[in-house]
Amino acid sequence: MKPTIADFPATRLRRLRRTPAIRDMVRENTLSPADFIWPVFVRDGEGVVEPIPSMPGVNRLSVDKVVEAAREAHALGIPAICLFPYTDPSLKTEDCAEAWNPDNLSNRATRAIKSAVPDIAVMSDVALDPYNINGHDGFVEDGYIVNDRTVEALVKQALSQAEAGVDIIGPSDMMDGRIGAMRNALEGAGHSNVILLSYAAKYASAFYGPFRDAVGASGVFKGDKKGYQQDPANSDEAMRLIERDLREGADMVMVKPGMPYLDICRRAKDMFGAPTFAYQVSGEYAMLAGASERGWLDGDRVMLESLMAFKRAGCDGVLTYFAPAAARLLNG
Ligand code: PBG
């Protein structure tokens, strides 16, 4: 749509920017705690709050503390919390069996949250990297991350998460055919209402660095994920991935990372109109939080501005480590 515009001085666009009341009237997008999904890192133990150095203000939490976080999130109006396990190195194996252990950290946290705070939605991550001896999202054979055998394992992982009671499953692995396989398996196992939020357009990004520290994957991981995650140079490919995943049974789609990929968010929303989320990833958080800590940026303002940008780009919501801080600010 091309805006109609008269010549100056009939049009003075500053008229609509003069006072707070007028700016409130013409604001095109809004931000509220309901726009956020809060990613949290879960670790073993009791009463543990362990800071993550590359993500100032973000901690690994033991299950009891995650339940407290869920309670806090719910009170703030945040609708969903997303679990990422920090897996003990002794549980990382070549067959990644811990990924579908009904009593693994992620599943224990899910059950604890769902019994203590049933109204908050729990989202889980599907990918083998927290459990894999080499830090990859799939099985490695002769240096190649194999697709179909990985998908079989991811389906088992997804089913164990559904069994534990997650509301939303987030496959972040970028294998081909996994959404269809998971949807089939979920339907077959009586989990027809479990939501699939596909990390459909996920790029091979250097912005995931701090996350890999947070889940303890940095030490073991060598190389890159370019054989399955997308090339940052591509945009059309993202549309093909999103269309494919929607056809296979994704309820919602995600673009990841967020801030450097807002063009992808806008294109996806315009093209498909599906519920579209962005992940403001660990490196984006680290840039803003790190600079704010040093006094180089006004932390509160850049936080809210960056989150509003996702709404402006067409996103329905955003996964963000800022969720509780932003919600507190927005709630006054
Ligand atoms: C793993 C996964 C990653 C993130 C979410 N799930 C890292 C990766 O793909 O290496 C990154 C999130 C972040 O950086 O905040 N499948």
Image (cartoon, helix red, strand yellow):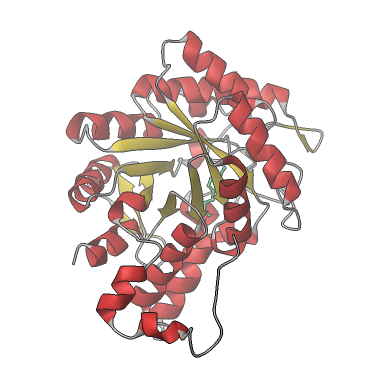
Please state if 279 lies on the left or on the right of 322 as rendered. Answer: right
Q: Nearer the viewer, residue 308 or 291?
A: 308
Q: Quadrant of residue 121?
A: top left
Please tell me which residue lies in front, 66 or 187: 187
Along the line of sight, the residue nearer the viewer: 235 or 212: 235
What residue do we see at 48% from left, 85% from top? 10
User: Is 249 rendered above or below residue 210?
Assistant: above
**On screen, 58 above or below 252?**
below
Q: Residue at x 29, y 54 (%)?
A: 33
Q: Is residue 244 left or right of residue 170?
A: right
**Camera sees residue 185:** yes
* Viewer can see residue 229: no
Percent across and percent down for residue 208 are: 57, 56
Q: Position of residue 54 (x, y in %)?
A: 47, 66
Name the residue at 76% across, 58% down. 233
Q: Residue farthest to the right?
A: 142
| Residue at 68% from the left image edge and 38% from the top image edge | 241
Q: Is residue 188 above or below residue 244?
A: above
Q: In the image, residue 328 lies at what x, y percent?
A: 23, 63
Residue 286 sits above or below residue 114 on the image:
below
Q: Quadrant of residue 145?
A: top right
* Quadrant of the image containing the C terminus: bottom left
Picture coordinates of residue 166 (x, y %)? 37, 29
Quadrant into which the N terminus falls: bottom right
Q: How many marks overall?
A: 0
